Image (cartoon, helix red, strand yellow):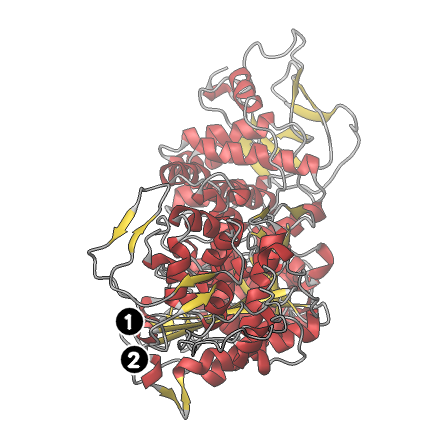
């Protein structure tokens, strides 16, 4: 049949039929009727088309089964049809291909009312084949949602630290969406939503004709089609390769017949699988409302500082207006000349008022409601969502540490791009280890004791606490304001994006020299090698320390290096015991101990406690390194001290207790790994000496001011010139490290004051505040008893026997040298001066 002999028909639109039979009588009249419900009727669309059947299609009786809902075909007067055809074809111009694809959709859909239009050179059998080979459905999947990071209060409730997102979206259920919003969307975007099966015939063809005839693109997509398009775009957003993303986005949004046909096919599949309520709910959750705002809940929050459930008629209509063209109608550009505050957001108001008229037309609102709403001004209440760690304020550096874990740990994805997508789009609820009781104490004392900016030099200070036996990071703060924005950082020295507590790879610095706190690893190696705490070493200062043994690098010779390290109090040294050297923090005493050890062994013992350089390089194992020249992150030292307090078992730090995904299912998190760093008897020997540091040595100022008092171990550290000062210690429950450092490496803390207090003693003013809260909340037990092998029995001098009567007067005795005093038991060892 050629085009000149095609019958002219009018299509009457009927609903809810599942299978259609096209009957071709001998006459030129064509009738479509339902195979299952031939007597049902519904609303008439009154659309006029030409239809050309495929010759030979179907059986010899002329009956062909087609996948369309029921329509009735009746003849139209030839003149009217020809007039319409001339107008239509003149407007179409070169767009027959698009019409053909629309026609294919109309003919071949399986369970929905869709267009049946003239096919120009396209056989029905080919159309059916093409259409049936297209994807038939798209799932309603989990959408991109923001991730939230929480900390725990003392009562067990949680506090939001920060949120992160690429798309600001909060998914909500059907009942959490205002009826005004539902009615506005259906009335304004798809008034036949509850009647069609995925594709609105009337809207599609009206838009096609207007687009072609007027040269202006029209929508015409049903709500289901809009949803499908958004789903396809969201799938593109999950691609980490930029080229693949761009190609996917183009395919999902381009204005071509094949893309439209695919969209129709998928929309029909969605309608088959999901209810109207499900579709409309997900439409509200997926739709963009301008910028990074997605979904009706986030839009209500952002534009009107309310919830989707509480949207008024006017607000709902304004939000639905944005959906039509977010760039044109969004309400957060008050300076816009076409849609800004000066003209009352005229573009949005015009679209809003159209939606209100449609709501009135379809009887969703009364005349009175309409009259009141249409004269109301558009009045957005822009409420910027909080995002990023800067919103965590005093807890920002801990927050930053958590984000680095989420972005770098393989638990959260095989590569960096995947981990970032999961973090910023996965809808994680991240419950952290931060204890706000301990954290608040750390923040308070930091603010009181160390200024953010100091005129005498750039001073940094950090406090971090780790739970013994679990590795859970309980506190982390520093004396700076957090910002990752270079422009903000340039405004003052109080801002930094560097976390002083952590490694460089975790957003931290390259580390700080811990000074004498590092000596505990030489003490551990000393005890491991069978030496006792009362064993004495030559601790005198000297310029020639000779050769040190190193099983890894070979002997290290200090004969000609003129290396003459001094002690902190500048004493010349003596023949000190290992316990005296520890209690008094005698540099030369530990160098003397190291002379009898293996430098490589000392390094390996430090590494067994999890110690490593903050910059990622290998630990130095020179003789100087034993007194703390390696640059180490304070968190690393806190972990090591927790390992000492845990009977030599060191647990790697963790900052995340659990993560709950958007579906309520928990997501695996990186666990703490615990290893036996040294034998428990060695740890007990270390703890014994470090308890003496706290009760009678360099740590007693911190210990004395800690209430309630529980058994505690500790070690102080001061670098050359007192540029950096540390206080590291632990109970059996929690380890805390305080470090006050010169960020430029030039400031001597003993010559500078914060108010009336010397900077060098700030550590001793902060550490007790934190540990007092720790002890009150977590308590503390006695440390393991010291093994006898680490304390040799004191030398017992027998009393002299009664002298026999002399046979002759004895010669006057020569002045004897005073006898060496027997070694005192550890509890009686006096501490030499020093740090």
Element under label 2? loop
| Residue 788, disc | none
User: What x and y, as percent, mark residue 167?
Assistant: 50, 55
Q: Which residue is mark 2?
A: 457
Give the residue furthest to the bottom.
756
Above or below residue 27? Residue 814 is below
Q: Quadrant of the C terminus?
A: bottom left
In this rendering, does residue 615 appear at all? yes
Residue in the image at 40% along x and 48% along y:
598
- State how far apart marks 1 and 2 are (Cα): 8 Å
User: What x and y, as percent, mark residue 23?
Assistant: 68, 19
Q: How many dots with numbers?
A: 2
Give the residue furthest to the top.
60
CB under 8 Å between discs 1 and 2: yes
Residue in the image at 43% along x and 47% along y:
601
Quadrant of the rendered structure where residue 752 is?
bottom left
Above or below residue 567? Residue 294 is above
Using a 10 Å C-alpha cutoff, classify the residue at mark 1 as few (fewer than 14 neighbours), some (14 to 19) or many (20 or more).
Answer: few
Element under label 1? loop
Q: Is residue 769 left or right of residue 482?
A: right
Q: Choose the circle earlier in sequence order: 1 or 2.
A: 2
User: What x and y, as percent, mark residue 578?
Assistant: 48, 63
User: What x and y, as percent, mark residue 540?
Assistant: 34, 67
Residue in the image at 55% along x and 43% along y:
411
Using a 10 Å C-alpha cutoff, classify the residue at mark 2 as few (fewer than 14 neighbours), some (14 to 19) or many (20 or more).
Answer: some
Q: Which residue is mark 1?
A: 744
Give the residue furthest to the front.
807
In this rendering, does residue 353 appear at all? no
- Frontmost residue, 795 versus 132: 795
- Frontmost residue, 609 versus 196: 609
Q: Is residue 578 left or right of residue 278?
A: left
């Amino acid at each position: 049949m050629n085009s000149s002999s095609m019958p002219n028909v009018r299509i009457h639109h009927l609903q809810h039929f599942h299978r259609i039979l096209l009957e071709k009588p001998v006459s030129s009249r064509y009738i479509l009727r339902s195979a299952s419900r031939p007597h049902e009727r519904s609303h008439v669309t009154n659309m006029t088309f030409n239809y050309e059947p495929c010759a030979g299609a179907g059986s010899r009786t002329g009956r062909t089964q087609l996948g369309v809902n029921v329509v009735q075909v009746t003849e139209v007067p030839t003149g009217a049809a020809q007039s319409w055809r001339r107008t239509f074809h003149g407007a179409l111009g070169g767009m027959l291909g698009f019409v053909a694809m629309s026609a294919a959709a109309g003919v071949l859909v399986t369970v929905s009312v869709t267009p049946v239009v003239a096919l120009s050179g396209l056989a029905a059998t080919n159309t059916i084949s093409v259409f049936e080979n297209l994807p038939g459905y798209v799932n309603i999947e989990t959408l991109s949602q923001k991730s939230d990071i929480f900390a725990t209060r003392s009562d067990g409730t949680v506090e939001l630290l920060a949120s992160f997102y690429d798309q600001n979206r909060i998914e909500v259920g059907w009942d959490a969406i205002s009826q005004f919003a539902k009615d506005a969307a259906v009335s304004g975007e798809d008034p036949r939503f509850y009647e069609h099966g995925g594709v609105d015939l009337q809207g599609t063809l009206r838009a096609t004709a207007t687009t072609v005839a007027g040269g202006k693109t029209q929508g015409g997509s049903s709500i289901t089609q809009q949803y499908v398009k958004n789903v396809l775009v969201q799938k593109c957003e999950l691609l980490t390769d930029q080229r693949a993303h761009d190609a996917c986005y183009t395919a999902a949004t381009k204005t071509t017949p094949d893309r439209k046909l695919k969209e129709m096919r998928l929309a029909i599949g969605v309608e088959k699988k999901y209810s109207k309520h499900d579709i409309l709910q997900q439409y509200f959750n997926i739709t963009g409302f301008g910028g990074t705002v997605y979904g009706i809940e986030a839009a209500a929050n952002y534009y009107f500082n309310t919830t989707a459930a509480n949207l008024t008629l006017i607000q709902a209509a304004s939000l639905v207006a944005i959906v039509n063209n977010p760039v044109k109608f969004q309400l957060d550009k008050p300076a816009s000349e076409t849609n800004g505050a000066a003209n009352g957001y005229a573009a949005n108001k015009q679209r809003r008022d159209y939606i209100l008229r449609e709501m009135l037309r379809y009887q969703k609102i009364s005349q009175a409601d309409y009259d009141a709403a249409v004269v109301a001004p558009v009045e957005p209440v822009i409420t910027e969502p909080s995002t990023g760690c800067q919103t965590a304020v005093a807890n920002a550096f801990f927050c930053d540490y958590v984000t680095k874990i989420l972005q770098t740990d393989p638990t959260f994805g095989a590569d960096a791009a995947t981990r970032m997508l999961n973090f910023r789009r996965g809808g994680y609820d991240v419950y952290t280890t931060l204890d706000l009781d301990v954290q608040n104490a750390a923040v308070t004392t930091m603010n009181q004791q160390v200024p953010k900016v100091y005129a005498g030099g750039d001073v940094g200070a950090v406090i971090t606490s780790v739970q013994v036996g679990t590795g859970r990071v309980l506190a982390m703060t520093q004396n700076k304001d957090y910002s990752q924005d270079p422009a903000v950082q340039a405004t003052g020295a109080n801002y930094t994006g560097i976390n002083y507590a952590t490694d460089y790879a975790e957003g931290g610095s390259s580390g700080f020299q811990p000074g004498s706190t590092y000596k505990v690893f030489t003490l551990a190696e000393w005890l491991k090698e069978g030496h006792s705490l009362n064993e004495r070493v030559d601790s005198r200062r000297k310029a020639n320390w000779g050769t040190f043994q190193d099983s890894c690098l070979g002997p290290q010779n200090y004969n000609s290096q003129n290396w003459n390290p001094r002690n902190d109090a500048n004493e010349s040294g003596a023949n000190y015991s290992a316990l005296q050297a520890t209690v008094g923090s005698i540099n030369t005493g530990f160098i003397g101990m190291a002379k009898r050890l293996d430098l490589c062994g000392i390094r390996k013992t430090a590494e067994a406690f999890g110690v490593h350089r903050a910059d990622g390089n290998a630990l130095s194992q020179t003789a100087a390194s034993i007194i703390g020249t390696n640059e180490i992150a304070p968190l690393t030292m806190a972990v090591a001290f927790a390992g000492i307090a845990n009977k030599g078992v060191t647990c790697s730090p963790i900052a995340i207790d659990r993560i709950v995904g958007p579906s309520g299912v928990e997501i695996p998190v990186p666990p703490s790994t615990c290893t036996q760093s040294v034998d428990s008897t060695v740890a007990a020997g270390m703890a014994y000496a470090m308890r003496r540091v706290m009760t009678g040595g360099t740590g007693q100022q911190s210990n004395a001011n800690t209430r309630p008092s529980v058994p505690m171990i500790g070690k102080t550290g001061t670098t050359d010139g007192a540029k950096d000062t540390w206080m590291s210690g632990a109970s059996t429950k929690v380890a805390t490290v305080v470090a006050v450092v010169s960020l430029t490496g030039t400031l001597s803390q003993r010559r500078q004051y914060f108010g009336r207090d010397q900077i060098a003693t700030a550590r001793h003013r902060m550490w007790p505040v934190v540990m007092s809260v720790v002890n009150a909340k977590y308590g503390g037990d006695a440390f393991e008893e010291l093994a006898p092998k680490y304390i040799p029995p004191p030398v017992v001098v027998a009393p002299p026997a009664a002298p026999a009567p002399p046979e002759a007067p004895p010669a006057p005795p020569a002045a004897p040298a005073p006898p060496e005093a027997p070694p005192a038991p550890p509890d009686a060892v006096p501490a030499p001066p020093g740090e």
